[in-house]
Image (cartoon, grey):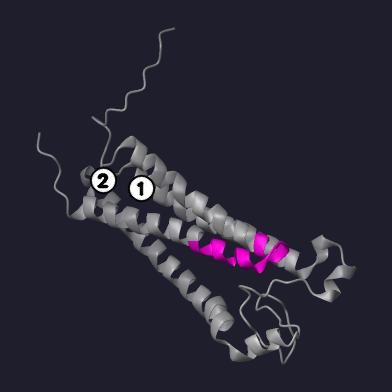
Amino acid sequence: MGNIVISTDRSGWPKLVEFPLPAKALLTMVILTMAVALVGALGQIAVHDIIPTFFAEEGVAAKSTGEVVASPHQETGEGSIGRGDLFDMEPSETKAAKPFYEEQQFVWTLKWTHIHLFGMSMIFIFVGAITVFLNLSVRARTWLIVMPFLGVLIDTSGVWLKGYISPAFFWLHLPGGMLFGTIFLFVSFRALWEMWFHSPDVS
């Protein structure tokens, strides 16, 4: 059996600019729909976490006086403050009596992790599929495919680390989110440009 030669030459490999109109329309709608979904997720983070954490005076006051402040992901009764959970991940005294897998924080974090990983991974599977056909080098496309998944893993690890080691690990959300957000923006704009505004090479 002869040796298998893998060529890195892109001759014969389809480019986005060469896609038929229905394929371009499909990819464009996928990109726009995912963009709207990510904007919605960003809005939820701002309203649900960032604003209550940094701008809710009653939450800050309660935290400074040592009162128990309920996270928004916890099921609380009437009168709960509802402060954002970016820093409010410290274990309470009532959790010590339960096994860790029954703690409300563990259950919520595990649930958030698998939903987040499935949802974000599906987005970047589609983004990766689009990236494969970008008119870029093999190395550039490979990094563009891998990096957003690393960003999602960094973002997810921040939830566990801030809950069980230190609230300071909240800041891992910034590099993680910026990594996959930047790649999404670059691939989206690059793909739309190649499909609709870039003329194919004339040979």
Badge 2 crowding class, 10 Å Cα cut-off, few under 14, some 14 to 19, many 20 or more, is: many
Q: Are marks 2 and 1 in contact (CB under 8 Å)?
A: yes
Residues shaded magenta: 161-174
Of 192 and 83, nearer the camera is: 83
Task: Give the farthest residue toward the top.
Answer: 1
- Residue 94: % across, % down: 85, 75
- Residue 124: % across, % down: 45, 52
Choose top left, top right, bottom left or bottom right for residue 14.
top left
Residue 146 inside the magenta-drawn segment: no
- Mark 2, residue position: 16
Question: Mostly what secondary structure, the magenta segment?
Answer: helix
Residue at 73% in and 68% down: 105
Left/right of residue 175 with respect to residue 61 in the rendered view: left
Mark yes or no: residue 118 visible.
Answer: no
Left/right of residue 116 with respect to residue 162 in the rendered view: left
Query: What number is the disc on residue 70?
Result: none
Left/right of residue 63 with respect to residue 23 in the rendered view: right
Q: Amino acid at mark 1?
A: Ile
Residue at 55% in and 61% down: 172
Q: Quadrant of the C terminus?
A: top left
Query: What number is the disc on residue 130?
Result: 1
